[in-house]
Structures are given as C-alpha cells and as structure tokens.
Image (spheres, rainbow, N blue to C red):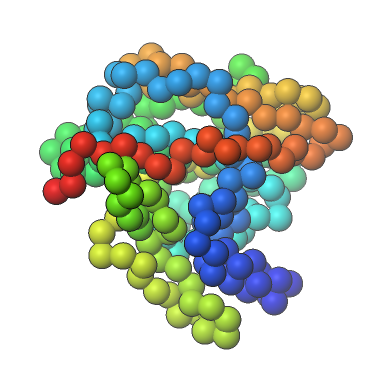
Amino acid sequence: MKKKIILILTLIYSCNSLTLISPGITSEYRLGKNTSIKFEESSFYGTNIYQINVFYIENENRNIIFQDPNNILDLKIKENFQKDISDLDILLLAEVCFEKEKFKKTPLDLILYDFELNGNKYLDKIEYIYPYSYSMKGNKYTLERPLLIHDNYPNQNKIIKTSDDFVTCSRTILKFNKGFQNDGRNKVNIITPRYSNISFEYLIQKGKFVIQNNEEFEFNVKVKNKL
C-alpha cells in the first residue's frame, strides 16, 4: 500500500499538465458547472484572479488529500474532522482562488458560504488555505501545480518549493450523508453572502462517480496587470 501511494505522488508531481491538480485530485473529478460567475463575486474577490471549482473525492483518495503538505490547516482540527468520516459519508471539495493582495486589510467571507447537495445541507465541513505556483502566459495567470511538492522517487520524503510567489486558494471539504446522493444526476449548489447561486452537476452510476470531460477546466485566469 505504501508503494502505491508513493507511485501516485510521483506520477502527480512529475506531470506538467494541469489535468493533475494535487495529490488525490485530478480534473477528471471536477464537477460540471451549470452557471457562470456573477460580476458581484469576481469584483469582490479581485478582478485579476477569481475562479471556483468543485471536485468529487473518491474514498481511496481521502487520506492522500489530507496528507498534502500544502494544506494550511491546524493538525487538531484536521484530526477531529477525519475521525468522524465513515463509509456512510461522501466528500466534496470546493475550491475558490482569489487575489490575495486584496484581503490584506479586508476579511474574507468564505466561511459564510452555504453548500447543498440535492437540496440537503452539508453535515460538516473543514476549511483551509491552499497555495499554487503560477506562470504568466500573455495576459493570463496559469496555475501550474501546488506550491510544495514531494521530490521524485526515491527522494519522495523531501519537499520542494516550486515558486517564490503563489496564487491563494481556499479549499472547503464538505461531508454529506451518502443517502443525499442519487444514482443518476446530482446537483451541488453554492450560495454566497451576495446571494449568488452557483450550481454544479455530476453523475453516479451503480454507486460510482462517472468521469467527466472537463476541457473548459478553469486554470487560466485573466489578469489586468502584474505587480
């Protein structure tokens, strides 16, 4: 089992493509978005950088996600959340990336977001900051990979910093009762403090998540200027 996890991490970090987002998460598990982002949201979080995505977390990837060295998260909070997860739960990960400079003096309001799965409120959630390194391509930021990565095998215990600067994202892991999930189409709603309703969909067939084609994956973010 240990060798399998090492192999997964090595494959993730040796790939330059953004189909691999971070340990335990690939773009194949991104939920399809049904609604576009309202102006109120992008203007609040910064017109230079703003995006929101939701990912489905498979049971076998749960521990890998929580062990990611990029998670800026209190250890005790993480342990308390993990110990209450059972096979009767499903986990989703919502990620909002934003302009970090804008919030040096203004508080973030991500804690006020509400989340629903097929009209049912989440049972529990955990929130933390997650940094990505980036590059500039034309007038866009391109998120490249997590800021901290494990070195390739056999030096996988060594952690490497991929950039001196980074784009800030906020991740929320949501716990729902498995009974809230349909065999078929499922809808996730995110309601913001500005009353924007952002919806996503995914399919379950015979209890398994259906891999989706997400060619429109949002990792290129327009930028007005580079400071």
Q: On the rendered image, what quadrant is the N terminus found in?
A: bottom right
Quarter assignment of residue 7: bottom right
Spot the residue most to the right: 206
Residue 112: where, in percent of width, then height? Answer: 37, 27
Spot the residue most to the front: 138
Residue 36: where, in percent of width, then height? Answer: 45, 21
Residue 71: where, in percent of width, then height? Answer: 42, 56
Vertical relation: 92 (above or below) 180: below
Vertical relation: 201 (above or below) 154: above
Q: How many marks?
A: 0
Q: Can residue 49 be seen?
A: no
User: In the displayed structure, does residue 72 sit left or right of residue 102?
Assistant: right
Quarter assignment of residue 211: top right
Vertical relation: 187 (above or below) 150: above
Q: Can residue 159 be seen?
A: yes
Residue drawn at the location 45% of the way across and 80% of the way down = 158
Spot the residue most to the bottom: 154
Quarter assignment of residue 171: top left
Vertical relation: 104 (above or below) 6: above
User: In the displayed structure, does residue 24 sit left or right of residue 167?
Assistant: right
Residue drawn at the location 60% of the way across and 30% of the way down = 32
Q: Nearer the viewer, residue 133 or 60?
A: 133
User: In the displayed structure, does residue 49 sit left or right of residue 205?
Assistant: left
Residue drawn at the location 30% of the way across and 52% of the way down = 136
